[in-house]
Amino acid sequence: MVDGHLFEPSDVSRSDAMTQRSFLSKPASSSKWHRPELTYPRQVQAAKSLKPYPVVFHKPASYSQALKAAALVFVSGTAPIDPLTGQVVKGPVQAQVEQCLRNISAILEAAGSGLEKAVSATLIVADEEDFAGANEEWLKWFPRNPPARQGAKMPVRIPDMKVSIAMIAEA
């Protein structure tokens, strides 16, 4: 619906399949309008290793590192885990943001995407005082045209973890 007008699927260019799927349609045998069900194939994505480290980055058991669906890659909240040690990187929030973004970059690369295709991110910090330091490191990775971003405070304390980042990118 645009400006109160309902469009038939034939009013839309055939080249935009995603847009066409979202329009209401009326089956010939019915007088009721309905929205066709939107279904997209889902593909689980996981980084096989985090370059330049040859160590295998193990997929978490309770969730997917990322899912590829509807021409997007949805990366789960990613901790600042060093793939060599399997431990949270210690140090200032800047170092942890850097490690999170390195990990996300490897996950996106495994999905055929990259940080340059990021469209949205969620930055979760343990302490609100860390937002300034997190922004400092963030701007090194996204100096121009950064993705849309929202922030939140961690609901649970995890030892040594100051930040977690989730991201959505174009596939």
Image: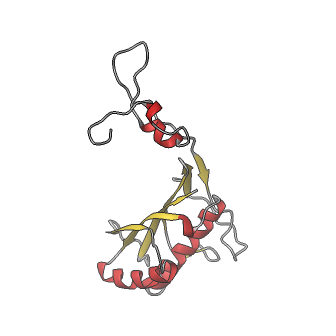
Q: Position of residue 115 (x, y in %)?
A: 55, 69
| Whole-percent x, y for residue 94 in the image | 46, 84
Residue 82 left/right relative to 142: right
User: Residue 162 at x, y = what percent?
Assistant: 41, 77
Colour setting: secondary structure
Q: Is residue 137 above or below residue 19?
A: below
Residue drawn at (59%, 73%), measured in percent from left and top?
A: 86
> Vertically, is 165 above or below 32?
below
Question: Can residue 29 be seen by looking at this rendering?
Answer: yes
Q: Quadrant of residue 150?
A: bottom left
> Image quadrant for the C terminus?
bottom right
Q: Specify the quadrant that holds the N terminus.
A: top left
Task: Give the quadrant of residue 2.
Answer: top left
Please identify the residue farthest to the left as the structure is shown. Answer: 4
Q: Is residue 81 visible?
A: no
Q: Residue at x 62, y 68 (%)?
A: 106
Q: Is residue 166 shown left or right of residue 103?
A: left
Report the number of numbered marks: 0
| Viewer-nearest residue: 86 or 128 | 128
Residue 163, quarter of picture: bottom left
Q: Residue furthest right?
A: 54
Identity of the residue drawn at 53% across and 47% down: 70
Choose between 121 and 78: the one closer to the eye: 121
Residue occupying image coordinates x 40% and y 70%: 123
Q: Is residue 90 above or below residue 158?
A: below
On the image, the x and y values in percent for residue 38 come to 47, 36
